[in-house]
Amino acid sequence: MASMLLTSLRSSPLTSVQTAQFAARSLSTSVHLQAQAKSKKTLAKPGMKNIVLVDGVRTPFLLSGTTYADLMPHDLARAALQGLLNRTGIPKEAVDYIVYGEVIQEVKTSNVAREAALGAGFSDKTPAHTVTMACISSNQAMTTGVGMIAAGQCDTVVAGGVEFMSDVPIRHSRKMRKTMLSLNKAKTLGARLSLLGSIRLAHLAPELPAVAEFSTAETMGHSADRLAAAFGVTRLEQDEFALRSHMLAKKAQDSGLLSDVISFKVPGKDIVSKDNGIRPSSMEQLAKLKPAFIKPHGTVTAANSSFLTDGASAVLIMSEEKALAMGYKPKAYLRDFVYVSQDPKDQLLLGPTYSTPKVLERSGLTLNDIDVFEFHEAFAGQIMANLKAMDSDWFAQTYMGRKSKVGVPPMEKFNTWGGSLSLGHPFGATGCRLVTTVAHRLLKEGGQYGLVAACAAGGQGHAMVIEAYPQ
Amino acid sequence: MLVLVSAYTRADGDVVVSRMASVRLLLSRSCCTAAKTVTGHGQRSLSVSSAVLARTHVSYEVKDNVAVVRINDPNSKVNTLSKQMQAEMKEVMNEIWGNSAVKSAVLISRKPGCFIAGADINMIQACNTAEEVTSLSQEGQKMFDQIEKSPIPIVAAINGSCLGGGLEFAIACQYRLATKSKKTILGTPEVMLGLLPGAGGTQRLPKMVGLPTAFDMMLTGRNIRADKAKKMGLVHQLVDPLGPGLKSPEERTIEYLEEVAVDFAKGLAGKKVPMEKKKGLVQKVQDFIMGLPPVRKQIYKTVHSKVMKQSQGLYPAPLKIIECVQTGIEKGNAAGYQTESQSFGKLAMTSESRALIGLYHGQVACKKNHFGHPERDVKKLAILGAGLMGAGVAQVTVDKGVSTILKDTTQEGLARGQQQVYKGLNDKTKKKSLTTFERDGIMSLLSGQLDYRGFENVDMVIEAVFEDLSIKHKVLKEVEAVIPPHCVFATNTSALPIKDIAAASRRPEKVIGMHYFSPVDKMQLLEIITTDKTSKDTTASAVAVGLKQGKVIIVVGDGPGFYTTRCLAPMLAEAIRALQEGVGPKKLDSLTTGFGFPVGAATLADEVGIDVAAHVAEDLGKAFGTRFGGGNIEVLKMMVQKGFKGRKSGKGCYVYGAKSKEKTVNSGAEEILKSFKLTAPPAVSGDEDIQYRLMSRFVNEAVMCLQEGILPDPVQGDIGAVFGLGFPPCLGGPFRFVDSYGADKLVQKMKRFEEVYGNHFTPCQLLIDHAKNSSKRFHK
């Protein structure tokens, strides 16, 4: 199936993109999908609370180093929180708890959730904590909230995520830090001078954070290139998928589908209200780029990878009862979710392949039941590799302990409003964007079930099933 | 704990003296690999007339004007440059060169772990004269010359071992890619077999990597990892190994390598990829300096004197390598190639090369389990005693992924042992052969403890506690109370008879000796000792564990000192006598190293520990009687009394400075020796006599071990002596030495010594048998 789709993609990328768009459009107007028999009428479980997504917002996702350049992470998070307050009109004191996800932390605001919440005017009586799980940090923030509600600890949780790549902590070298710390303790002038004298030029070399696995020291792009090669994903396939992402994102942006984006008046700058990384180009342009990681023969380029992004997102999660009591019309139910993990070296980015069948099994659905797929696009090569892995009986049998392949999501249901490649990928914030997008797409297209899947550094992965709230 | 530090090592276990290192290396890796005889080879050449149909080793296909040549020896795990491989390669290349549609070529192996592992040793061993070997070399030279002058660019795509002739092939190609896999190693290990790179290697390597690096590669024979090879300029590009995809990682990696190589080949043919790398400033300066004849002359001189110092002139191959390189550079290619092929032929006929090749074969044989597969795999091991040996055994076990308990009786002892394991692994991270994460993962398999917690689940216990029978008995009883019935009890002792230890056991069939050599992570030998009661399955299990730990294993019978310690004891007794007779420690050392021992006898005594030597001498003296006499054991006892216990106490025959390299003769020890002074009998005290006195006692004892059935065969005797005790590798071990030197000559010498010293030098019956009948040989 996937190979068929891929072939069609290869032969005429534009047509297939158009087909996808056409399909999406036709879905939005007709209800034939709803007519299709589902394995289950609903995923509600007896004795379990229904947990709903009331709404979700995000700041525009900007290329790092652009308009947000002079902010700090909590500023972005605050903007998202305020945007959520505005959008939902929820009284601040009604929020029981706030959880945020963030990956590269500003050391001054390591609990960015708390700093952002205070700045956004939330009661200082509302506790907030920050979680981190690489690219699925805000998924973790949401499921943490889900857990708290399910356990009866709270009814109303704000979850979100933020990433700010315009400024990252660059540290002194370990030797320099050690000298500086000793300097604090040195009592006499002589002791201080001798410590200062021990500083060598090499000690001044700074330590930069890298998007690299600590366990393997391999950068993610390098691993993605190897993954693509392992699954025989060509450069052409990757460029085609990247182009598709940008074209679909552009289309969604232009048609006003990206309604989760809020406007944000950046202090000292203009109001920002659009993502700025969407750049539909041409296959010829894409083909010109040199490989970014494995040189000179690699296939992953800057254009077919997600770019460094600044952005924040937030969602309001409540128990259904509470939401209804407060007069909300929820957008979706958050249903089953799973976390998976595998070899961080050779299967770093295969999270979706492992998490998709697991969450489907858990919820008792099949791939055919899913109307909307939102997969996190770290690299075009990573998405293609996952699709090939899901389409391979051999891989399923050899590495997943399954009898047969997972199966491939149909492309006309897959990331049809763009994805991380085009919209941008603020590591900590992407998860909420995926979930909100699924909810919005279900509403727009009239589907019932949606699936979010994502990979993350550390060889981890996540998937969640989302059910449309009956309108 | 009694530790028998072998001749290769220092007690600190850290630095292995360089020559020893080279000797160790010499035997640890293969260069030319002995491929099994090609079955059906004759048949095929008889029955099939068309050569094309008969091609089994080399195949090719043309993809987009690129000829992809794939090599795969169907009869062996590795590819070797056998006659058949060469013949088919020649045919294929001629077809490719004759095909005008082919614009470039890729050379690749279909075997996942091996590009080409070298020339076929059997092919060289089958030659009877130097001329035959020379002509083999010339054929190789000619073939690679054609490759070098190929009208179309050839890309060597290397994955797995690329050694010896394999590397010579690769460097004749126009372009080289290598996978960044741990299995990908490049090198010219011929010197370890007493040979030299005989197919143009001595001529091409210096031009490619520069004179100093080329000498380093060819004289040490060391393996070079792909990333290093790239830095050295030995390969042009690296290709990453792939993980699982739609095929197995190994299969897909080769496919990927081929795809990348084909791209490069096209690029080279289209002149889009430059053949030569741009030289940096440093490289240019270096080239300029190397261009100056006086500089080169100085290099030859320095290298020559270094080789002489390290090899004592006992190994002809390194000197020939220098000669070949020098001739090629100073007198031109033609002369260089001629010297190379002629030297190759000559070297192949030397006794040194035969000895080294013999050791290579022996080593291969001792890396197999001849006792079958044990009923249970050892999944959990426990080690008692976290001393030098215990911790060493723990290190080589956990780093193979086996969960291990390290138990000691004191907190301090345990901490020291755990630190030793950590340091051993951490040093590897510094050398980049291990990542810090791999180190941490390995360390997590080690459980340090003071009690017997978890012993109910262990499959084998190796005890390395103090060498005292009553302590061993106590430990054995304690352990047997907590271990499951199937658990093997192995004892690491260097001299106590296993049956005496097993006497305290409720299940003697599960008791076995495992004699490790210190430092365990560096010494390759493991001597396994079985008693009459040890079951075959217990032996199989011990061998399996040893093999897993990466050891070369000899399995010997039980008796005082088993094999290795028993051979060493009379030699040390003789060394003490020589010292008493006024041969100074330094002189004694130079006599022994001059014979090819990596460590001199006096230094060896210090390394082993004077107290240990005294202990062993006394024990074995009691067991074997006056035959084990020689030096006065009181010398050793007196030294121990004065605190001269050897290196570990800072004083022994020598005084050891804070820096490990400094050592001066210990005047205190000299005084003791003076008080025990003996008159040196002039008839047997010449330098050579002293050498043969030491040597003959070692060799005679080894032969006696064979005669008594302690040793199952001469091969294991040679391997044990060389790998465990540092017996001169150039002589190939005591048994090969008897064969090549002549049993009759040795017996004559011994009779002469016997007249002076009595039964210490009485040749054993088996040696006499061999002396009487020159057709009797230990090795065929």
Image (cartoon, rainbow, N blue to C red):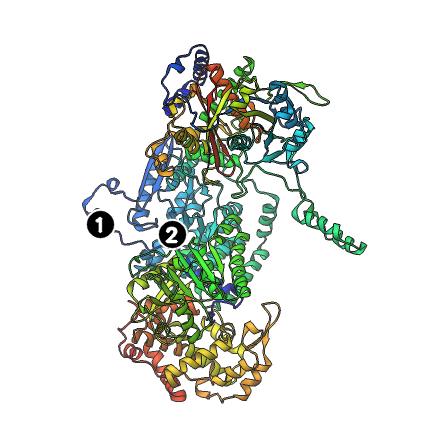
Q: Is residue A362 above or below residue B296?
A: above
Q: Are marks 2 and 1 on the same chain?
A: yes
Residue B108 vertical position relative to residue A24 in the rendered view, above or below: below
Instruction: Residue A235 in the image: state x and y as whole percent.
Output: 46, 28
| Residue type highlighted by circle 2 | Gly
> Cα distance, mark 2 to mark 1?
22 Å
Residue A326 is situated, as x and y percent measured from the top left of the image, at 57, 20
Residue type, mark 1 in image: Gly
What label sits on residue B523 in the rendered view?
Answer: none
Q: Residue furthest right?
A: A189
Secondary structure of the residue carrying numbered label 1: loop
Q: How many marks?
A: 2
**Residue at mark 1:** B40
Q: Which residue is mark 2?
A: B118
Disc 1 chain ID: B
Residue sitting at x 36%, y 37%: B247
Please report, as a chain letter, where disc 2 is located. Answer: B
